Image (cartoon, rainbow, N blue to C red):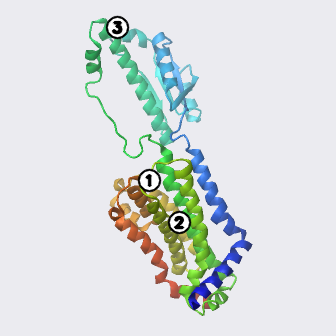
């Protein structure tokens, strides 16, 4: 009962600090909620749509105009301009007015009808990899469909049946199955890693900042006195309120994406609840460990922010970890977001049992327990260190 009473007293003290310092309110509530709304709103259509592209149609025939109309109908791209030459279209692409352009040379229709195999070119920028790839896909699709349409017309004129024509044009029929994310939605697989990653960044920063402020204003002795010098009780009391606030924010995010936006999931509510707990406790544990490793407000926050930002790249959501170099693959195990993302993919997204992700579960528990190795150093810092800006 004595320890519980001390934890409660320290928690009340921490609550008063949180209410008087606006930084806590912004970093623990406002910014995470804005991040959640920003990313879910940015990718609410699933895939980028109506990317601007241009056309250089020097043939200006019924066939070329038909190709342009078909290109404009595709979902991902939109023909926004026609250019008189390749140089003009290239300049527009370099000035970021368009992401790609289709070049139809003069005499294309004539060569098609005479069977002389005309050449149609398309150019796309890879300065923006996503936009360039999607524009390239649509341009490749429309040129393939255009040549197939001409071939179909020629074979039909020669008396081939529709079945023979399709066998010739598409000898192998592809049956595509996109597992777990059949819409190919960027929102489903990017938001579920980016938003938790940014939330974990705030958790790490606030965990280190809270201890750093005790050192800066020389209130660490008072904080320890409320726990009778027991640093474990002092830390439990201090971060009790932090954990509750962050758990509430994470729960709001999970309810928003699954209850409001209806993101796909196969895992149970208990899988999501466990993931939320490990996300919050693992992040706070790393922030405390960073301060214990280097008891300095500036350095501990720098370590936390660096580790959290790097974890966005090392999680494997944007670039697969298995495609990275071997040293980077080994390094990825040191980032909490990597284990969070794997747990999410295995248990929540795909619905596999928790035992299949046991290593990632143990890793997040280990991040939660990291402060145990530095509690004595934190206590020593509060009692003896002098704050240096």
Residue placed most toward the observer, 74 or 100: 74
The reply, left or right, for residue 361 in relation to residue 75 is left
In this view, the mark in front (1 or 3): 1
Q: Position of residue 356 (x, y in %)?
A: 33, 62
Q: Earlier in the sequence, mark 1 or mark 2?
A: 2
Q: Residue at x 56, y 90 (%)?
A: 230
Q: Is residue 208 above or below residue 227?
A: above
Structural distance between the alpha carbons of marks 1 and 2 = 18 Å
Task: Name the residue carrying label 2.
Answer: 306
For the residue labelled by badge 1, is the local secondary structure a helix, a strand or a loop?
loop
Badge 1: residue crowd in 10 Å (few <14, some 14–19, many ≥20): some
Q: Earlier in the sequence, mark 3 or mark 2?
A: 3
Structural distance between the alpha carbons of marks 1 and 3 = 49 Å
For the residue labelled by badge 2, is the local secondary structure a helix, a strand or a loop?
helix
The reply, left or right, for residue 369 in relation to residue 218 is left
In this view, the mark in front (1 or 2): 1
Which quadrant of the figure contains the N terminus?
Answer: bottom right
Q: Residue at x 51, y 12 (%)?
A: 60
Structural distance between the alpha carbons of marks 3 and 2 = 63 Å
Badge 3: residue crowd in 10 Å (few <14, some 14–19, many ≥20): few
Badge 2: residue crowd in 10 Å (few <14, some 14–19, many ≥20): few
Instruction: Name the mark on residue 317.
Output: 1
Residue placed most toward the observer, 322 or 272: 272
Task: Name the residue carrying label 3.
Answer: 114
């Amino acid at each position: 009962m004595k320890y519980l009473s001390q934890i409660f007293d320290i928690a009340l003290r921490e609550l008063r600090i949180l209410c008087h310092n606006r930084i806590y309110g912004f970093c623990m509530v406002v910014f995470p909620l804005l991040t959640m709304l920003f990313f879910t709103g940015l990718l609410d259509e699933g895939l980028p749509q109506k990317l601007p592209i241009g056309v250089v149609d020097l043939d200006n025939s019924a066939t070329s105009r038909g190709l342009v109309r078909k290109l404009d109908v595709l979902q991902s791209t939109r023909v926004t301009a026609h250019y008189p030459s390749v140089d003009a279209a290239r300049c527009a692409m370099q000035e970021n007015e368009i992401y790609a352009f289709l070049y139809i040379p003069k005499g294309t229709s004539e060569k098609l009808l005479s069977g002389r195999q005309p050449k149609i070119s398309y150019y796309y920028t890879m300065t923006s990899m996503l936009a360039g790839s999607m524009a390239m896909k649509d341009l490749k699709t429309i040129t393939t469909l255009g040549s197939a349409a001409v071939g179909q017309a020629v074979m039909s004129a020669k008396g081939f049946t529709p079945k023979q024509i399709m066998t010739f044009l598409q000898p192998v029929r592809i049956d595509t199955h996109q597992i777990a994310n059949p819409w190919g939605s960027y929102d489903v697989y990017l938001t579920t890693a980016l938003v938790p990653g940014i939330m974990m960044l705030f958790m790490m920063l606030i965990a280190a900042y809270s201890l750093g402020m005790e050192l800066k204003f020389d209130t660490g002795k008072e904080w320890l006195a409320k726990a009778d010098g027991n640093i474990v009780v002092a830390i439990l009391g201090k971060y009790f309120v932090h954990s509750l606030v962050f758990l509430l924010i994470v729960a709001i995010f999970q309810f928003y994406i699954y209850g409001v936006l209806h993101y796909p999931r196969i895992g149970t509510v208990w899988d999501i609840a466990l993931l939320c707990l490990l996300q919050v406790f693992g992040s706070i544990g790393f922030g405390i460990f960073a301060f214990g490793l280097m008891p300095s407000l500036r350095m501990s926050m720098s370590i936390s922010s660096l580790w959290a930002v790097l974890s966005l790249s090392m999680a494997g959501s944007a670039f697969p970890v298995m495609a990275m170099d071997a040293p980077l693959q080994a390094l990825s195990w040191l980032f909490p977001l990597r284990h969070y993302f794997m747990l999410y993919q295995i248990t929540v997204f795909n619905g596999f049992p928790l035992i299949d992700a046991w290593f990632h579960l143990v890793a997040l528990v280990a991040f939660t327990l990291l402060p145990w190795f530095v509690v004595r150093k934190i206590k020593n810092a509060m009692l003896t260190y002098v704050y240096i800006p």
